């Protein structure tokens, strides 16, 4: 192991030239910086940030499925790559989104149990929720900065961006967490620690809204778990397709981010000819093998 600061470019480039491969984990900026510095003949093994979400094609899933999703949100604290950040609903009606948000907030309250956040995190979340309310009252929407952002997503998100109007927002407390309903379909990181976003995303807009984020997508928890819906998300770049109740489950022998990690660190060499022993010990080995063959024949 060589402890070298990333600012030491001379040493970093020297090690890159000597390396058989470079493993990099981090933001897009970090990966792009390594790509620019790495020699062309050195393999890059890239790992980066990933986002995951749930999608309800049917807006009335069984309560036990939603309970499992709530436990997943609290249990992982939404810190894993496979943690649910957003719950998308197959609708363009924000009233439907708010109705689901109220219902899911009650389920989260019930399922919180011992997985709730610390007082420090609860205080942080309370401040953030109050900020959202003040922004809404003052007409700046969920986030003041969203007025200046140009959304790449389709539908209402495009309309809001073009008009300079921030998307509508409604917050429901859920124990130490919250359910935040926003009237756009942008995939983003939630407030974490039990604070999930709920957004509308009609099925026909899935590829338009998500394909541009294909490099950052990992897990989708679906209801219902249909092959047709799964293929749609596969086209968007999702690599882990599952139900609402097993978003953070992984098999030891399973893939990671769409590949088998060990394969990235190995190289296959194929010998397509009959090998023979060479070198200073080859004659001695050959003599030993002949003596053994002679003894076997004598024994017969």
Image: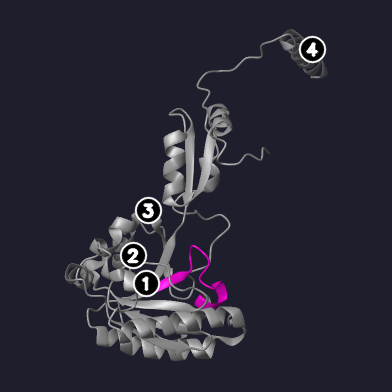
Marks 2 and 1 in Cβ contact (< 8 Å): yes
Say which label, 2 or 4, has the lower sequence index. 2
| Among numbered discs 3 and 1, the one appearing first in the sequence | 3
Query: What's the mark number on residue 225?
Result: 1
Q: How far apart are marks 1 and 4 (CA)?
A: 66 Å
Q: Name the residue under label 4.
A: 291
Q: Which of marks 3 and 1 is in front?
A: 3
Disc 1: CA contacts within 10 A as few (<14), some (14-19) or many (>=20): some
Q: Mark 3 points at which residue?
A: 215
Residue 249 x, y percent position in the rendering: 53, 67
Contact between marks 3 and 1 (CB within 8 A): the answer is no
Who's the residue at 38% across and 67% down the image?
188
Q: Nearer the viewer, mark 4 or mark 3?
A: 3
Q: Is residue 292 visible?
A: yes
Which one is in front in this view, the residue at disc 1 or the one at disc 4? 1
The percent position of residue 5, horizontal first and vertical second, equals: 60, 41
The structure residue drawn at horizontal position 50% and vertical position 80%, both measured from the top left corner, is 125
The span picked out in magenta is 73-86
Residue at image mark 2: 230
**Image depth: mark 2 or mark 4 in front:** 2
Label 3 sits on a secondary structure element that is helix
């Amino acid at each position: 192991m060589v402890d070298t600061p990333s600012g030491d470019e001379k040493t970093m480039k020297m090690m890159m030239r000597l390396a058989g491969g470079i493993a990099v984990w981090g933001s897009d900026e970090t990966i792009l910086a390594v790509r620019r510095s790495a020699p062309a003949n050195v393999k890059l093994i890239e790992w980066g940030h990933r986002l995951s979400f749930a999608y309800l094609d049917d807006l009335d899933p069984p309560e036990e499925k939603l309970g499992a999703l709530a436990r997943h949100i609290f249990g992982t604290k939404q810190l894993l790559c496979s943690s649910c950040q957003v719950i998308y609903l197959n609708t363009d009606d924000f009233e439907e989104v708010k109705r689901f948000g109220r219902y899911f907030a009650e389920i989260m309250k019930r399922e919180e149990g011992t997985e709730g956040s610390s007082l420090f995190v609860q205080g942080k979340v309370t401040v953030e929720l109050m900020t959202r309310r003040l922004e809404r009252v003052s007409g700046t929407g969920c986030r003041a900065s969203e007025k200046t952002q140009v959304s790449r997503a389709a539908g209402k998100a495009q309309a809001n961006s073009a008009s300079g109007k921030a998307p509508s927002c409604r917050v429901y407390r859920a124990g130490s967490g919250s359910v935040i309903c926003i009237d756009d379909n942008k995939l983003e990181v939630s407030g974490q620690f039990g604070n999930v976003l709920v957004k509308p995303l009609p099925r026909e807009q899935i590829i338009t809204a998500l394909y541009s984020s294909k490099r950052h997508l990992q897990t989708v928890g679906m209801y219902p778990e249909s092959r047709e819906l799964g293929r749609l998300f596969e086209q968007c770049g999702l690599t882990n397709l599952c139900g609402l109740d097993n978003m953070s489950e992984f098999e030891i022998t399973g893939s990671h981010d769409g590949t088998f990690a060990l394969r990235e660190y190995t190289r296959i060499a194929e010998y397509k000819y009959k090998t023979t022993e060479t070198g200073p010990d080859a004659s001695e080995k050959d003599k030993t093998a002949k003596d053994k063959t002679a003894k076997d024949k004598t024994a017969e």
